[in-house]
Image: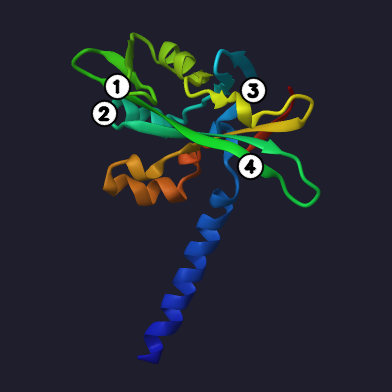
Amino acid sequence: MPSFTKPLSYAALMLCLHIAPGMAEAGEYAARIEYADLDRVDDGYDVQAHIDYQLSPTAKEALHKGVRLTWDVAIELRQPGVLWDTIIHKHKLTYSLQFHALLNQYVVQTPFDRSEMFLTLSAAMNFMAAVHDSMPIPAEQVTAGTPYLLAVKTQFNREQLPIPLRPVAYLDNQWFLSSAWHTWPIQK
């Protein structure tokens, strides 16, 4: 029995050393939040943001083979504090992108069960990039003259991938398609 533990431990260590550098960095395919702002509407404030999605060659290949790609856009309105920020309002919007080979079109499923079809991938990505939230932040949650931070993050949802693809998506940096939190000061 002891003769098996040493080679197994060595093999496990070598595997971790080989995989770990790729897990540490998101690379050039991570989504970027370019801007976000609040616009006043009748019953509150709408969030508007622009997200630059970059698909890796591996993600594009999976998309063209019929795999649905899903992102969750998290939105938080925060009030800055001394030690930590207080979250005033938060919600999540889910977008998915899929290619239909029979129709030769891309379908974007929006957070409110609306779907749009596009002839090109760039047109579909441009549609997804413009986040127009139709769930306004209630006006009573925003006090005039108080500083706020609007935080936006997009998270690629690996759990929506087919089960055989999920382990690869957690280890291969070409599937690191999420963004970090980005914040903008808001004065209302």
Does label 3 or label 4 sit earlier along the sequence? 3
For badge 3, the amino acid type reads Glu
Task: Say which residue label 2 marks.
Answer: 66
User: Residue 87 — which label?
Assistant: 4
Q: Nearer the viewer, mark 4 or mark 1?
A: 4
**Do the numbered discs 2 and 1 sit on residues whose CB atoms are within 8 Å?**
yes
Q: Is residue 14 above or below residue 91?
A: below
Q: Give the residue displayed 55% in from the left and 37% down from the top.
A: 90
Q: Is residue 27 above or below residue 101?
A: below
Q: Is residue 64 left or right of residue 142?
A: left
Figure quadrant of residue 161: top left
For badge 4, the amino acid type reads Ile
Task: Say which residue label 1 marks.
Answer: 99
Residue 108 seen in the current view: yes
Q: Nearer the viewer, residue 42 or 59?
A: 42
Q: Is residue 166 left or right of residue 39?
A: left
Does label 4 or label 1 sit earlier along the sequence? 4
Secondary structure of the residue carrying numbered label 1: strand
Does label 2 or label 3 sit earlier along the sequence? 3
